Amino acid sequence: MMVALPMVNPHVEVTALIPGWVDVVAVALAAFFTGVALTERRTALVGALFAGVLVGIGGGVIRDLLLGLRPAATQNHWYVLIGALFALLGVMFAHLVPVDAWLSLLLDSCVIGLFAVIGANKALVFDSPWPVAILLGVTTGIGGGILLDVVRGDKPIIFGGDSQWAAPATLIGTSLCVGLAYVLPGPAAGWIGGVTLVVLRMCGAKWHWSDPTVHQVSLPEQRSSPAA
Amino acid sequence: MMVALPMVNPHVEVTALIPGWVDVVAVALAAFFTGVALTERRTALVGALFAGVLVGIGGGVIRDLLLGLRPAATQNHWYVLIGALFALLGVMFAHLVPVDAWLSLLLDSCVIGLFAVIGANKALVFDSPWPVAILLGVTTGIGGGILLDVVRGDKPIIFGGDSQWAAPATLIGTSLCVGLAYVLPGPAAGWIGGVTLVVLRMCGAKWHWSDPTVHQVSLPEQRSSPAA
Amino acid sequence: MMVALPMVNPHVEVTALIPGWVDVVAVALAAFFTGVALTERRTALVGALFAGVLVGIGGGVIRDLLLGLRPAATQNHWYVLIGALFALLGVMFAHLVPVDAWLSLLLDSCVIGLFAVIGANKALVFDSPWPVAILLGVTTGIGGGILLDVVRGDKPIIFGGDSQWAAPATLIGTSLCVGLAYVLPGPAAGWIGGVTLVVLRMCGAKWHWSDPTVHQVSLPEQRSSPAA
């Protein structure tokens, strides 16, 4: 089979790394919505701050570790401070926020899209081959949420259930972003991938698309013994 | 908003890194108590050794990775060896240990305090800004226990339940330790922060302080529809 | 107690690092069987791909991070691509694979053995002391599976239950592999350790050996108060 497993340096039209403050804005939004969501449950305050920081920086930390970098989130004081502060604000003002389900979903999708594009961009800038860039984009996008689900003992939506098409939209949008980065300038690829992600997610939620399941691609339908 | 996200080099009165053998003593204590606690349940022996190592080195490993360092726990043979050995001793001698609830709680608090101060100290020595130092101190203090809860499928105490004030005490003690490190010599800051952590935890357990919850800081009490 | 915590450089007969394509073959097998196993449950397709990649590369990623290295799995495109592809193939052809319980168990054991030997080899090549090499071998062997269990909310088999002796066999085989590496050439140590792991696992499953539990090493049987 393959022998050398060469390092594939993608000939990507790398522009620049997306600036850090965009990342911090995404962290603030993610932490805020985490705080808002937690008021529905009996959660300890320290746990809520921890959850906000975890969802805010978790995906990016995993991405940076997988790239062999010191995580951006521990190199300055903004990430942790903003994550904890906005989780607290989310908890405090949860009942004042006029909760429109569609607006919430739109903002949640935008945060996922922002994180996914930032993650894919950083992976490509640091010479990752395209499958790695897609994995790290998806991880940055929904990794923080998966981490919180895992830590809280909830089953992550990526495995099914009521994800409102978050997982497929993230995979498709991120793949588009990475693929287009080979032929388009970086910002164009990022915008197209990110907007596609948000639009697909919103359409999926609006028309109740169900996530594709393993049964739909399982080849032979002759599940011979219907026992069990 | 902020543009450059500068690396904040704290003007901390850095003394020296707390020596490694203190860390290893904390690992031994943490692993031993993990082993003692596991005999109450039907646990596989290999799992108990794994749990002891995980609780002993887990928090410190996460801290070191977040600092961009090779984990201390894999750089010499003491950490893993001591963790596994003391977990085994904990399992073996669990029924000989005269279990006084208050002594157990005191020792448990001391282990958390020791880990938290070691973690905050290391973060500051490696130029972390103060919010990062607090996060990493708390992570080193209770990260190993959270990891074990997550791996075993238990809900971590940081999110609520019967934490006996462990989470708030850890956050307050670590914050004090980090804050005082800016104005006091390192050892003084560490002792004050660590002792505060232990005292708060013991007081919290003694007088049944309940962890502050998100409902207590949630601003408007007009939870309009009391349904559900 | 000990003062310097010296870095123990093992005088191991280090030969060469096991070539990367062996690792990728193990990833393919692990991802394929993960896909096959997931068709028994209602899993989202994106989740199945994610699970295949997680089980395939998860253990090795943790090993590399603990060694302070950039994970091998993100340095070329094979790992992620092969992991996702073979998870998809596993899902698609699950019902065509003639499932013989013993053949499945044998292949599963071989994958664990392959990963464990690869992990211990890499740890020793990068100058890890023997307790660390054993830990990292075991982690590479069963870490991916533990990660999937944790993320899915299942209790990892390492803590008990129906592991079919996977955990003890992995610990014994890996320890043998690491220990023999001090006196035998690397390949011989690897083969002996790996084959021992597979044979022990198969024997354990065949004769229904139960995993040793903490109660079997717990010293005094005088559990005085049988209450609770």
Image: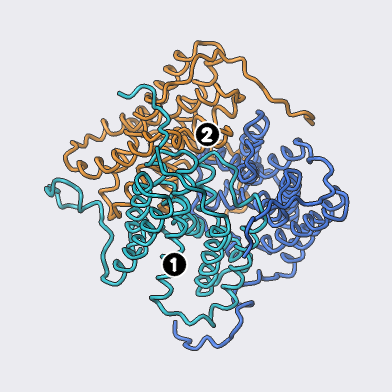
Chain colours: A cyan, B blue, C orange
In front: A141, or B61? A141
Check disc 2 and give the amino acid type. Answer: Asp
Please give the residue where the numbered disc 1 appears in the rendered image: A108
Asked whether the residues under marks 1 and 2 belong to the same chain, the reply is: no
Q: Secondary structure at mark 1?
A: helix
Q: CA distance from mark 1 to mark 2?
A: 33 Å
Task: Say if B106 sits above or below C167 in the image.
Answer: below
Q: Position of residue B203 (x, y in %)?
A: 77, 65
Q: Quadrant of the C terminus of chain B?
A: bottom left
Horizontal arrangement in the rendering, residue C81 relative to residue A37 (left or right) = left
Label 1 Cα neighbours within 10 Å, binned few <14 / some 14-19 / many ≥20: some
User: Which chain does the numbered disc 2 sit on?
Assistant: C
Q: Residue sitting at 21 percent across and 52 percent down?
A: A215
Q: Secondary structure at mark 2?
A: helix
Report if residue B108 is visible in the image: no
Indicate the quadrant where residue A170 lies.
Answer: bottom left
Indicate the quadrant where residue C170 lies.
Answer: top left
Horizontal arrangement in the rendering, residue C75 relative to residue B85 (left or right) = left
Q: Position of residue B191 (x, y in %)?
A: 84, 52
Q: Position of residue C49 (x, y in %)?
A: 33, 46
Report if residue C220 is visible in the image: yes
Q: Residue sitting at 35 percent across and 53 percent down?
A: A171
Please give the residue where the numbered disc 2 appears in the rendered image: C64
What's the mark number on residue A90?
Answer: none
Q: Position of residue C182 (x, y in %)?
A: 56, 14
User: Which chain does the numbered disc 1 sit on?
Assistant: A
Task: Say if B39 sits above or below C177 in the image.
Answer: below
